[in-house]
Image (tube, rainbow, N blue to C red):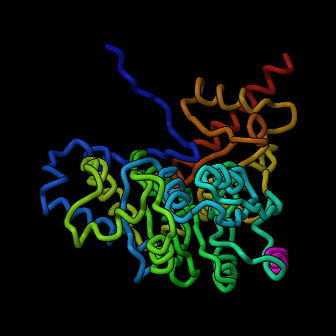
Amino acid sequence: MLFYRPNYLMMTAGPTTVSGNALHARSKAFGNPDLDPDFLSYYKFVCHRLRNFIGSDHSKIFIMSGEGMLGLDSAAASLTEKGDRVLVLSNGVFGEGFKDLIQPYGGEVTIFESNWKKSIDFDKLKSFLEIDSNFKYATIVHCDTPSGLLNDIGPICKLLKSNGILTVVDTVAALGGVDFRMDDWSVDIMLSASQKVFSAAPGLTIVAVSDDAWKTMENRTSPIPSFYCNLLLWKNIEENKSFPYTMPASDIISLGTAVDNLLSETLFRAFDRHEEMRDLCIEKLKSFGCTMYLEDNFSPTVTAFYPPEGINPDEVSSHLKTKYGIMISGSYGPLAGKVLRIGHMGENAREDRVRFTLDCLEKTILDLKEKKSV
């Protein structure tokens, strides 16, 4: 029998290392999630605990069975009708990628392009909207994971909403490690997932929906062209005491444990811890010749960098994993094969892990330099 037993420290930009108690929780016995009212009560409890990170007293919060991309696809499916104009705010690989989720549902996408090494240009966006603001909704990525860029979404979302545009935010790689204020920032649909800062296993999408977004979905002129991606099916699960489909009970129980882990410290301490690890990464990486990809707006959850000149990024990843037992991430799109990333989020935003990773990365670079000089 073939067993899959990875023996490396996973310091990637997600998924992250799952804590021991969250792993153990997945092995616990569970009842029938379709029929057991106690499971529904526990599910509601986990959703309520997630409210601490989302910053909303009014939105409906729920957990769907599917990796974080399910939430993005569901938002596009549930809001978009044929011919709807949708504004995609793009300053990164994932920001631009929203268009590929919207177009299959008939949306007409306009891409607002901004510098990929900085936050969305607020003044430029304001001027753009003064000329054209006829959009049903807009999408923006909070942390564009391939580059480690953190967008300042509060003012941006409020600006969009003041122009009558619904806001859809992908905060998959930020929620829990970065302040998020759904109500204060006028966010209409918030999308996150289990496998990043929450340090639970991949497979769950976390969604929060505002009253305005529900009304828009309910007032569609055409049916939502999906079952699995239909957010309306989740609006009344508590009142109906049933889910649209069988929930993965073990994953929910594990996520509940992971959420408790993160809430065992104050939110401000959790945010500070992530910022401290980001600053440590940047300082140490620069000290041994690496260059940051970004100019500013570095995310507290992931850092993207170029290795020293003449050092191949793929060789760095391979050597680091093979010799030192640490896995870090490459990147995607135009950054693939050029940029490397260290994930310092959730359970991995700990000084011992980050320092160990950086020390071994420095040794890797020295090893590769020595190899080239022979």
The quadrant in which residue 165 appears is: bottom right
* Magenta-highlighted residues: 123-128
In the image, is residue 229 above or below residue 340?
A: below
Residue 125 is inside the magenta segment:
yes
Q: Position of residue 38 (x, y in %)?
A: 14, 62
Q: Residue at x 50, y 80 (%)?
A: 212
Residue 340, visible in the rendered structure: yes
Q: Residue at x 39, y 65 (%)?
A: 232
- Nearest the eye: 20 or 372: 20
- Determine which quarter of the picture holds residue 234: bottom left
**Image x and y of residue 143, in percent:** 63, 60
Q: Quadrant of residue 122?
A: bottom right
Q: Is residue 100 left or right of residue 187?
A: right
Residue 340 percent coordinates (x, y): 70, 41
Percent x, y of residue 319? 66, 26
Quadrant position of the C terminus in the picture: top right
Relative side of 288 to 275, left or right: right
Q: Nearer the viewer, residue 211 or 25?
A: 211
* Overall secondary structure of the magenta section: helix
